[in-house]
Amino acid sequence: MTVGFVGFEITWRKDVFSGAPQAGSAANYGTLGINFRARKARSEEELIAALAALSCEVSIRDAETSAEEKTGGR
Amino acid sequence: MSEHTLEDQELDVEVLRQAIQEEYAEVAANPEKGFHFHTGRPLARMLEYADEWLIGIPEHSIESFAGTGNPFSLGELRSGERVVDVGCGAGIDSLIAAKKVGLDGRVIGVDMTPSMLEKARDTAGESGLANVEFRHGYAEELPVDDGWADVVISNGVLNLMPDKAAALEEMARVLKPGGRLRIGDILVQKAVPESAKRKIDLWTG
């Protein structure tokens, strides 16, 4: 049985490295401290439903419309 | 610390663990030395730890605090709950959690650095909190039974794990179904090149 996390959420971010006594590499990569939370799925079914909600479907009609917009309708 | 560079090699996990242990043994022994991250009570204030949480926590646990976030801001711990603190260091978050869950709750702090564990055990004894214990182990192989915990907390540790998926799988394993993950860590806003990921010194500094 595969059970992972659902409800992932970053709630806070802040520069927590500036002004530290020694220079480090944090600033080079725009490093921030963060808080995040999630919850272990209660069942495989809950996890599958959460993963399905993450999927993004683009219909063929939408894709063709998008392509026409990019080429100016030609 | 000497410079460890593995330009054309895969990251050696044992070498990385050794370098991290050297760094954090220094944070345990000489917290006033000054590192590339903030430490101690000033850091706790920066991360919005409430002063009341620190009441009764021995100062030499607080002085070696080196978190990057605040797991307790993400939701309350309830009386009687079981908590695992992954990468507990000198034990400040484990002790705060032990106060919050009370005598009917339990807290297990896990860390790979022996001097941090020693400090954590000393401070737990001094604080008189009997509902917390500290175990040696790695985030990727937590010494905790399946489904034991209501909550897993961690602070500034996941970013030090070369195999983050393995660490998260272990956190999921020890949580009960529906159990909560409460993490303070870091986020990089610019891509880190693959070559940089193999530089041990970049992981520790």
Image (cartoon, rainbow, N blue to C red):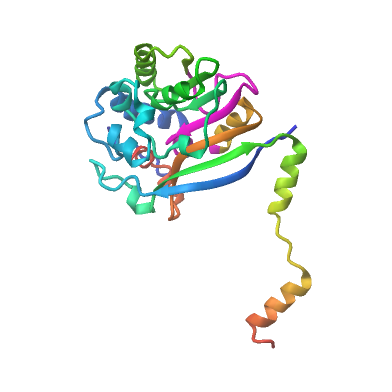
Instruction: Note whether B47 is above or below B92 in the view shown.
Output: below
Give the residue at x 45% y 40%. B185
Q: Quadrant of residue B169?
A: top right
Q: Quadrant of residue B35?
A: top left
Location of the C terminus of chain B (image quadrant): top left
Total marks shown come to: 0
Asked whether residue B142 is drawn in magenta, I would say: yes
In the foreground, B134 or B161: B134
Give the residue at x 69% y 87%. A73
Residue A46 rendering spot, x and y as whole percentages: 74, 40
Asked whether residue A4 is drawn in magenta, I would say: no
Q: Is residue B72 visible?
A: yes
Taking the image as shown, residue B51 lies to the left or right of residue B146, namely left
Taking the image as shown, residue B194 lies to the left or right of residue A16, namely right
Residue B131 rendering spot, x and y as whole percentages: 49, 14
Residue B197 rendering spot, x and y as whole percentages: 43, 44
Give the residue at x 72% y 73%. A63
Taking the image as shown, residue B127 lies to the left or right of residue A57, namely left
Q: Is residue B163 visible?
A: no
Location of the N terminus of chain B (image quadrant): top left
Question: Over which residues does the magenta segment extend?
Answer: B136-164
